[in-house]
Amino acid sequence: MLGVGLALHPEPELLLVARRAIEELADFYEISPELHWLDATRPSTARAQLLHLVQASGKPTVGHGLFTSLGTPPDPARSGPLRELLAADQAAFGFSHYSEHLGWTCEGGLEAVLPLPLPPSEASARVVAENLRALKELTPRVAFENGAFLTPIGDPTLEPDFLRRICDLADCDLLLDLHNAYANCLNTDTSLEDWLTRVPWERVIQIHLSGGSQSEPDWLRSGATRRLDSHDAPVPEPVWAAYQRALSWAPRLEGVVLEWLGLREDQAAAHEQDLRRARELWATRPARPTPPAAEPRPLHEHLAPAEVRLALTEILHSRDPVSALEARLAAGSALARETLGGLDPEGLRLTQLIVKRLRFERVLQGHSRCRAEFQADPEGFTARFRAYDDAGPSRSPWPSQEAAAFLAS
């Protein structure tokens, strides 16, 4: 049993601001390997710092991946270096289990930068399961996490059934992110209560707790807003309520992780309060949790094939994603129209903003020269990045290679 842990991100501020929470209140740590490597051979300075902290603490760790791209058919050229990285971090950190985000991040040599949604279909589940089975060769146990998507594909109420089918096909575990579920249900106007009753609770071994925020009205011309899984605020009450349900329903639950990105000094008290509350509730969990009974529903028949994945990657890197989507739908196949036709236009626009921001951050992370140029001339650097981003999608998952391509542009 792991207990209550913290996600450790490569932010020096986190290690300083949350030092007491990290050293005294956390029972274990969650590490995301890809965040601590510049490429497949060069670790960032944060990796050594985190490894020292973990080894000195004597506390257990779990691994949590970001861009294995579970929804893309295996590509040895891309997955080979990632597997070597994971094997190295498994040996160094000794993860008790390893989880990965559900979704896809690459297609046809292009990188989407963040996990994008899959339709809840049988064919999608089989692709994901194949990749999860491959990960089992490298780690003691494998799980995957339900995602937060501003552009869900297909019927969003089928997501719990999709999670169950993947678990059955891959014979793997589930990391249940409760804020992701809350955000998705809020953005699609569906019932979180109903969603939770359909979760395969017998597969849940870990829970994520986090907070988020609403997007700003001025981000979109329509003034529309959506719930963002931004991990930058206290855990909201609906998520605490879902956590209490989870403690009563998940018979194999081993631990819960509190996630908080970009933690500021003025947020340290709220961060510690959330961690203490998670611990207090954890201590009240019943001895024999009993999940609710739910009859699985059939999944969609269609799959987002390479054509659709490639189209969505290019759409998100166009000047106007909604116009680009409309053009694709007009020119694409019937399957592409069926798969992409129900996308939320405003959710698509917000997804594009997030993709651009993450790509900008990767450029800064990838080379000290980029950081120096940005500090010296923020406006000029940002204008140069916009031109670079407009030229096309990313072609590498690694910050150093992204920065090199930017500097050469």
Image (cartoon, rainbow, N blue to C red):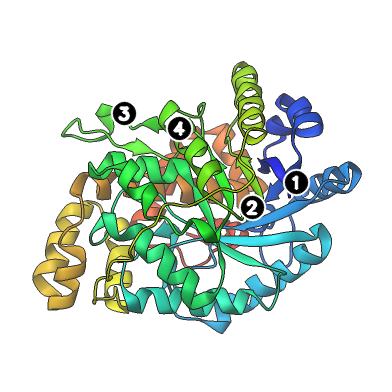
- Secondary element under disc 1, as helix, strand or loop, is helix
Residue 35, label in figure = 2
Q: From the viewer's perspective, tell me whether residue 88 is left or right of residue 149.
A: right
- State the residue at coordinates (80%, 60%): 94
State which quadrant residue 224 falls in: top left
State which quadrant residue 175 falls in: bottom right
- The Cα–Cα distance between marks 1 and 3, rounded to whole angstroms, is 32 Å
The location of residue 381, given as percent across then percent down, is: 48, 41
Mark 2 crowd level (few <14, some 14–19, many ≥20, 10 Å Cα): many
Is the Cβ of the residue at disc 1 closer than 8 Å to that at disc 2? yes
At label 1, which amino acid type do we have? Ala
The location of residue 115, given as percent across then percent down, is: 44, 58
Mark 4 crowd level (few <14, some 14–19, many ≥20, 10 Å Cα): few
- The Cα–Cα distance between marks 4 and 2, rounded to whole angstroms, is 31 Å
Of the numbered discs 3 and 2, the one sitting upstream in the chain is: 2
| Residue labelled with disc 4 | 241
- Secondary element under disc 2, as helix, strand or loop, is helix
Q: Is residue 111 visible?
A: no
At label 3, which amino acid type do we have? Glu
- The Cα–Cα distance between marks 1 and 2, rounded to whole angstroms, is 9 Å
Is the Cβ of the residue at disc 3 closer than 8 Å to that at disc 2? no
- The Cα–Cα distance between marks 4 and 3, rounded to whole angstroms, is 26 Å
Of the numbered discs 1 and 4, the one sitting upstream in the chain is: 1
| Residue labelled with disc 1 | 46
Residue 216, label in figure = 3
Q: From the viewer's perspective, tell me whether residue 271 is left or right of residue 52.
A: left
Instruction: Say which of 354 and 146 sits in front.
Output: 146
- Secondary element under disc 3, as helix, strand or loop, is loop
Q: Is residue 77 visible?
A: yes
Position of residue 407 relative to residue 375, above or below, is below
